[in-house]
Image (cartoon, grey):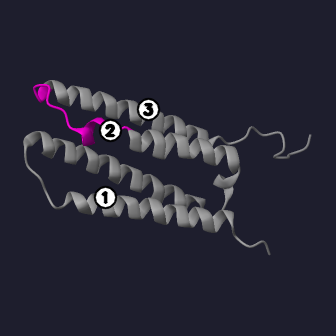
């Protein structure tokens, strides 16, 4: 009997995250439709399209990362990328939800710009850490 990690099943961290993002995109669609029922049929483009952040930004990106860099989750800085990027997606999704709620209510807030700036900043910073992980010079 040998103890070797060559026969162990592969960790599908990125696939699991892509599936979770698909579920969250579906949840965003459900939230939009339920809110439209209670909003007397009034809809907002921001709320109706908030599912795109977890769908494209989450599922598609993680599927592509798993395709092109399958073992990246083992890298040292991957967790920092993962946390920053997912936080950015969450901030953008919640900001889109709040923007939709305020549009339906007929008001606006200057604080929603902060959601966009911080959300896009977190995703960009996450991708900088991803690039630093992938393109790290070999020693």
Tell me the residue that label 2 is attached to. Answer: 49
Residue 13 seen in the figure:
no
Q: Earlier in the sequence, mark 2 or mark 3?
A: 3
Q: Is residue 6 above or below residue 22?
A: below
Q: Secondary structure at mark 3?
A: helix
Q: Quadrant of residue 122?
A: bottom left
Residue drawn at (14%, 46%), measured in percent from left and top? 102
Residue 121: where, in percent of width, then height? 40, 64
How many neighbours does mark 2 have within 10 angstroms: few (below 14), some (14-19), or many (20 or more)? some
Disc 1/disc 3 C-alpha distance (Å): 23 Å
Residue 29 seen in the figure:
yes
**Residues under numbered marks 1 and 3 in contact, where contact means CB atoms less than 8 Å apart:** no
User: Is 47 part of what is drawn in magenta?
Assistant: yes
Residue 109: where, in percent of width, then height? 13, 57
83 relative to 15 in the view: left or right: left
**Bounds of the magenta segment:** 38-51
Residue drawn at (40%, 36%), measured in percent from left and top? 24
Tell me the residue that label 1 is attached to. Answer: 116
């Amino acid at each position: 009997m040998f103890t070797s990690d060559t026969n162990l099943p592969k960790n599908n961290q990125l696939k699991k995250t892509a599936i979770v993002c698909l579920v969250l995109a579906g949840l965003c669609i459900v939230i939009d439709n339920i809110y439209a029922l209670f909003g007397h049929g009034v809809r907002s483009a921001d709320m109706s399209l908030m599912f795109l952040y977890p769908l494209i930004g989450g599922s598609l990106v993680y599927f592509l990362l798993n395709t092109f860099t399958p073992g990246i989750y083992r890298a040292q800085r991957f967790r920092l990328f993962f946390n920053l990027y997912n936080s950015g997606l969450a901030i953008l999704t919640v900001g889109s939800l709040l923007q939709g709620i305020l549009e339906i209510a007929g008001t606006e807030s200057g604080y929603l710009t902060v959601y966009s700036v911080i959300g896009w900043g977190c995703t960009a910073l996450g991708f900088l850490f991803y690039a630093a992980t992938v393109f790290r010079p070999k020693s």
